[in-house]
């Protein structure tokens, strides 16, 4: 077990000490008797089997209860050594009870992260834990999954190293229900990447910084507070719920250093700006501004510190426990500074937020005896207009009397109070939505450093699955997104995984895990699905929410098992119009306002005022707006108009499809967030709620596929290159060996379980854990090689040092011998005489010697100069040779690197060739389809041209017959009057027939009830047939009579239904005749007005 001291104070929240684990695991255990049994309160309780007989088991629970249950309901218990196990794929007995127990035991010890096969499960602790500090980040850096306790940092580190090793983009999908902790884990992942892959110290030349000195990693981290302020809010299940989806892509260079980042957002919940359910709040930024922490903001925005003064912000609650809005405002402001927002941009965003608050306080009243609305005071309108940089009277006039296009002309239209209030709400939502999108674009501009980028890791944080008392259009979009993500997880984990085995030729029996969600997705997104019908209804001016409901029922009720009528529920506070069976449960939806939400119409007169605003931010937000009435008659303008009409549902569907395409192009890593209880109580676990999430999220199935399958795989060339070091002798150096054969030989020579891997056509597949074991063996081998190199290097250095010591010793011995010899003769008389005479002998020859010495000196000087010149020449030559040697070494290294890159590129090219061939095939098929469609469109075009010429002829005929029609007009009006009277009479008849039908249905139902009662009696009496035969005969006779009565009633019912149907058909025919007549009249009146208007 690793040393946990490097994790600091986080250690006890990540892994228990050996002593604590030993105490928990050394308890008496009888594997044959100990088991789990179902329980109404705890889902499963521990029990001991006392007796087994005839498929039944008698058990005694730990709380002393004795119960007899079916043998199939008993689940095996794992030995105590598996208590609080870090990877549930290692459990001996994999069942719901064991997984729930392990998660509950770890959660009770505040260990919130647990591996579950290939992915990680995390449970929201509802309190702060010290597991995200900088020392924890450092401790996880570079660690393999098996080397450290489960943590979100470990998943992030694996994704980072997979990106570098496999040269492939990665993604991290952090999913779960609302309130499960997705946003917190997303922030921690971003914190980890920003820390471990940072460019370096602030202020470096290649590292962009803001005026406040914010580095790229600071900016990436600070993007979160800014987005959370404007995009997060309190809901019933979560105090900091993301009300939008985001996909954050963090880009890296070739060496793994941070390069840049960008953020894509999905479907901000606009309705929250103007409406909140009880117990919920508007977006955090409103309350941050009103906190009074920055008094200058209050003065600038003309607001007070009381949220109840503003209607849009006070429909739910106005405070959140453990959240200081004032401190959050400072954090938001600082984040915008670090992100490089200039003062005008900051003040512009604050002003628009304040203007929305004042918008909500605008009041209107109905004029006496008129439908026209008028302003009830202008104070709020004046404040909003001032902050928006527009004229107050223009704003009020635009709201009360908007200009609309009728035909080719613009007319001023009066508005009722209800219409004006709707327009105010729609404009408020549009301003906030566009401002939020601008905020994201502005952040992306800061995070785009223009540095070279090679790979990215995408982090997905989408609003979790939602089931509220009131579920509207926003909830459908959110749940549809989660349905698609869950299907992606299921497809990746269970379908693609098994298809890969078959494609690679591995012997495998396909397992159906029953996790396909396509039926529900098709019901929502396919043609004639919910979104398709909604878009279709949006095209019809007279369509309403109820016509949408009727169309939905006609197309899907009784035909699609995923759509049902809402079940009656007395506790339900709001009306439900239909129920959808999602993967996480049945959700009742209320469709009121769906058509308007989907069309998202705006008051274009006010939008025109916004476009001319002196507030640069507001003007830029609506600069590109093209409304339904804004297009000219010109062809290009018409095209723009058509392009601008895109419903919210179609836009969301398009963005979601792009997201799924992005995810499919990456290697995904899954983190499943679990909500432990509905009351947000720390440490408490609702067993049934957790079990429901485990079942829906496919946790158990994910563990099973991980245990049975081969989750790790490596290309043969990569395997040979990386793991050859384990046994170099297995692969001959002197001849070429195919990568597959080399891999087979290498694995055969290693001391591993040979049932734990399989050879595919292009890859070698490994069971869970074996690749990690090979990595450990490789690390050990590298450690041995490095130790051996170090030992040899140290030996060589010591031998050189020893040679120097020997040479110094020999020199010392020579010096000592000479000194001893001198000391022996120093006082000898003859030696003294020798010392005196020797100089005298030399003095006679001194001059001669001096001349010789001078001559010799000159020769030596000349030789010295020559040798100096030669030495300099040799030194220069040596320098050039050394430089040449270094250049050659660098060139050699470069060639070796190029060779390695070439081999890698070769493998990549082979892969890309296969992919491109598949793509070419797909494109060829698509081209054929396009050509087919083109020919169809050409024929349609010809038909339309023919129809157009025919219509022109019809117009000429109509002009001739116009005079005749005028005469017929009066006769038609009389006929319409008569038909109206007939209709009234028929309506009375229909109501009478409906009452009669109802009474007959009641009688029929009574007869059916009586029949059912008699059948029950017959079934009961048949058991005592021998004793009660006479009574049975009597009852059979009465049964025959009842059947006759029933048949008579059914005949009468069919006759009445036939009569009713005929009557209804005749009524419908009359209505159709009436509608056709009215349409003809309108056409004739229009044609007459056109003719009259001609000069």
Image (cartoon, helix red, strand yellow):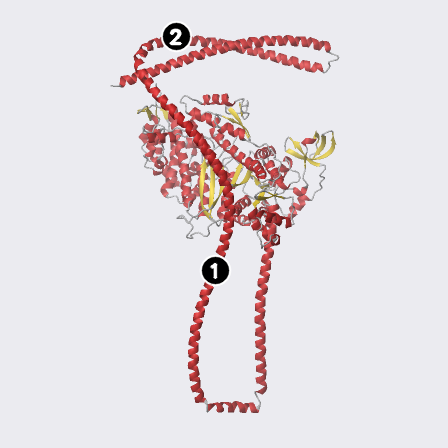
Q: Can residue 283 be seen in this view?
A: yes
**Which type of secondary structure does the marked residue at label 1 adopt?**
helix
- Residue 365, x across and y down, in percent: 36, 24
Q: Work out whether residue 249 or residue 603 is closer to the camera in this orientation and state it.
A: 249
Secondary structure beneath dot 2 equals helix
Q: In the displayed structure, does residue 101 sit left or right of residue 248?
A: right
Q: In which quarter of the image is residue 982?
A: top left
Identify the residue at image location x=40%, y=32%.
430
Query: Where 880 falls versus 939 (above or below)?
Result: below
Q: Position of residue 36 (x, y in %)?
A: 67, 35
Quadrant the C terminus occupies = top left
Looking at the image, tell me whether mark 1 or mark 2 is earlier in sequence order. Answer: 1
Residue drawn at (56%, 50%) of the image: 721
Please state which of residues 1021 and 539 is positioned toward the viewer in this rendering.
539
Marks 1/2: CA distance?
107 Å
Name the residue beneath numbered marker 2. Answer: 978
Residue 412 coordinates in the image, percent (x, y): 31, 24
Image check: 671 left or right of 848?
Answer: right
Numbered badge on residue 1053: none
Q: Residue at x 43, y 70 (%)?
A: 873
Q: Residues within 10 Å of mark 2 (few under 14, many from 20)?
A: few
Judged left or right of residue 646, residue 38 is right
Residue on which disc 1 sits: 888
């Amino acid at each position: 077990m690793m040393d946990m001291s490097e994790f600091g104070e986080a250690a006890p929240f990540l892994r228990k000490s050996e002593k604590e684990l030993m105490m928990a695991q050394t308890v008496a255990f009888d594997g044959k008797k100990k088991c789990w049994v179902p329980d109404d309160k705890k889902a499963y309780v521990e029990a001991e089997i006392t007796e087994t007989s005839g498929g039944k088991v008698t058990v005694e629970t730990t709380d002393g209860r004795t119960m007899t249950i079916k043998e199939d309901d008993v689940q095996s218990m794992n030995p105590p050594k598996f208590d609080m196990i870090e990877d549930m794929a290692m459990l001996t007995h994999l069942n719901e009870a064991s997984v729930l127990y392990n998660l509950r035991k770890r959660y009770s010890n505040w260990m919130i992260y647990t591996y579950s096969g290939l992915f990680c499960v995390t449970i929201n602790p509802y309190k702060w834990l010290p597991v995200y500090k900088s020392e924890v980040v450092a401790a996880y850096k570079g660690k393999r999954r098996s080397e450290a306790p489960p943590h979100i940092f470990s998943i992030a580190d694996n994704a980072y190293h997979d990106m570098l090793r496999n040269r492939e983009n990665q993604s991290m999908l952090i999913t779960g229900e609302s309130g499960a902790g997705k946003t917190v884990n997303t922030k921690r992942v971003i914190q980890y990447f920003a820390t471990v892959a940072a460019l370096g110290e602030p202020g470096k030349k290649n590292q962009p910084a803001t005026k406040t000195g914010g580095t790229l990693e600071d900016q990436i981290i600070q993007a979160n507070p800014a987005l959370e302020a404007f995009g997060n809010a309190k809901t019933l299940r979560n105090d900091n719920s993301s009300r939008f989806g985001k996909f954050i892509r963090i880009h890296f260079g070739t060496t793994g250093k941070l390069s840049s980042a960008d953020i894509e957002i999905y479907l901000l919940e606009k309705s929250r700006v103007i409406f909140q359910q009880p117990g919920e709040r508007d977006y955090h930024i409103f309350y941050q501004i009103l906190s009074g922490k920055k008094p200058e903001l209050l003065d600038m925005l003309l607001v007070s510190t009381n949220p109840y003064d503003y209607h849009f912000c006070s429909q739910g609650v106005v405070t959140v426990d453990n959240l200081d809005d004032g401190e959050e405002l400072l954090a938001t402001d600082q984040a915008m500074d670090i992100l490089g927002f200039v003062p005008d941009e900051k003040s512009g965003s604050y002003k628009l937020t304040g203007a929305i608050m004042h918008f909500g306080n605008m009041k209107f009243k109905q004029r006496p005896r008129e439908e026209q609305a008028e302003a009830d005071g202008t104070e709020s309108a004046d404040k909003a207009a001032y902050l928006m940089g527009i004229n107050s009277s223009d704003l009020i006039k635009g709201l009360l009397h908007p200009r609309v296009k009728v035909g080719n002309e613009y007319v001023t239209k009066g508005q009722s109070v209800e219409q004006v209030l709707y327009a105010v709400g729609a404009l408020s939502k549009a301003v906030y939505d566009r401002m939020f999108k601008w905020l994201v674009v502005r952040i992306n501009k800061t995070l785009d450093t223009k540095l070279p980028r090679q790979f990215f890791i995408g982090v997905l944080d989408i609003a979790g699955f939602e089931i509220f008392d009131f579920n509207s259009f926003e909830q459908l979009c959110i749940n549809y997104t989660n349905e698609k993500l869950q299907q992606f997880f299921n497809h990746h984990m269970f379908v693609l995984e098994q298809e890969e085995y078959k494609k690679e030729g591995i012997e495998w029996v396909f397992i159906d895990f029953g996790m396909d969600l396509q039926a529900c997705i098709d019901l929502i997104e396919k043609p004639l699905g919910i979104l398709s019908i909604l878009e279709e209804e949006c095209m019809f001016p007279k369509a309403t929410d109820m016509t949408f409901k009727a169309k939905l029922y006609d197309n899907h009720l009784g035909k699609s098992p995923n759509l049902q009528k809402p079940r009656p529920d007395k506790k339900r506070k709001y009306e439900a119009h239909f129920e959808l069976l999602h993967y996480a449960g049945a959700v009742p939806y209320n469709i009121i306002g769906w058509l308007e939400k989907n069309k998202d119409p705006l008051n274009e007169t006010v939008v025109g005022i916004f476009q001319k605003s002196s507030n640069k931010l507001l003007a830029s937000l609506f600069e590109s707006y093209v409304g339904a009435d804004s297009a000219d008659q010109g062809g290009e303008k018409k095209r723009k108009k058509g392009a601008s009409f895109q419903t919210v549902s179609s836009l969301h569907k398009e963005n979601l499809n792009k997201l799924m395409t992005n995810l499919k192009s990456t290697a995904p890593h899954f983190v499943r967030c679990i909500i432990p209880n509905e009351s947000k109580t720390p440490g408490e676990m609702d067993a049934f709620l957790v079990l429901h999430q485990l079942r829906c999220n496919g946790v158990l199935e994910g563990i099973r596929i991980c245990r049975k399958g081969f989750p790790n795989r490596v290309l043969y060339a990569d395997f040979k290159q990386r793991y050859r070091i384990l046994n170099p002798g297995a692969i001959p150096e002197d001849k070429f060996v195919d990568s597959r054969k080399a891999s087979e030989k290498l694995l055969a020579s290693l001391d591993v379980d040979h049932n734990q891997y399989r050879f595919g056509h292009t890859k070698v597949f490994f069971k869970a854990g074996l690749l990690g074991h090979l990595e450990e063996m490789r690390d050990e081998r590298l450690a041995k090689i490095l130790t051996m190199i170090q030992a040899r290097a140290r030996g060589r250095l010591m031998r050189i040092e020893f040679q120097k010591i020997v040479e110094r010793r020999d020199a010392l011995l020579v010096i000592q011998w000479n000194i001893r010899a001198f000391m022996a003769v120093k006082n000898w008389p003859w030696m003294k005489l020798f010392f005196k005479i020797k100089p005298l002998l030399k003095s006679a020859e001194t001059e001669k010697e001096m001349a010789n010495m001078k001559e010799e000196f000159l020769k030596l000087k000349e030789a010295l100069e020559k040798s100096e010149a030669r030495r300099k020449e040799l030194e220069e030559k040596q320098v050039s040779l050394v430089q040449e040697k270094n250049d050659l070494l660098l060139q050699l290294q470069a060639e070796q690197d190029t060779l390695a890159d070439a081999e890698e590129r070769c493998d990549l090219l082979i892969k890309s060739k296969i992919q491109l061939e598949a793509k070419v095939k797909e494109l060829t098929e698509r081209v054929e389809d396009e050509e087919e469609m083109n020919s169809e469109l050409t024929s349609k075009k010809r038909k339309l041209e023919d129809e157009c010429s025919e219509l022109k002829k019809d117009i000429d005929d109509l002009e001739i017959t116009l005079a005749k029609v005028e005469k017929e007009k009066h006769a038609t009006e009389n006929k319409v009057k008569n038909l109206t009277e007939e209709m009234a009479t028929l309506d009375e008849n229909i109501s009478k027939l409906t009452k009669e039908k109802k009474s007959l249905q009641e009688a029929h139902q009574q007869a059916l009830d009586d029949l059912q009662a008699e059948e029950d009696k017959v079934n009961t009496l048949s058991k005592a047939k021998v004793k009660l035969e006479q009574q049975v005969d009597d009852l059979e006779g009465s049964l025959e009579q009842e059947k006759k009565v029933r048949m008579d009633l059914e005949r009468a019912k069919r006759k009445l239904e036939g009569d009713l149907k005929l009557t209804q058909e005749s009524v419908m025919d009359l209505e159709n005749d009436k509608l056709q007549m009215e349409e003809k009249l309108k056409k004739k009146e229009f044609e007459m007005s056109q003719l009259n208007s001609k000069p």
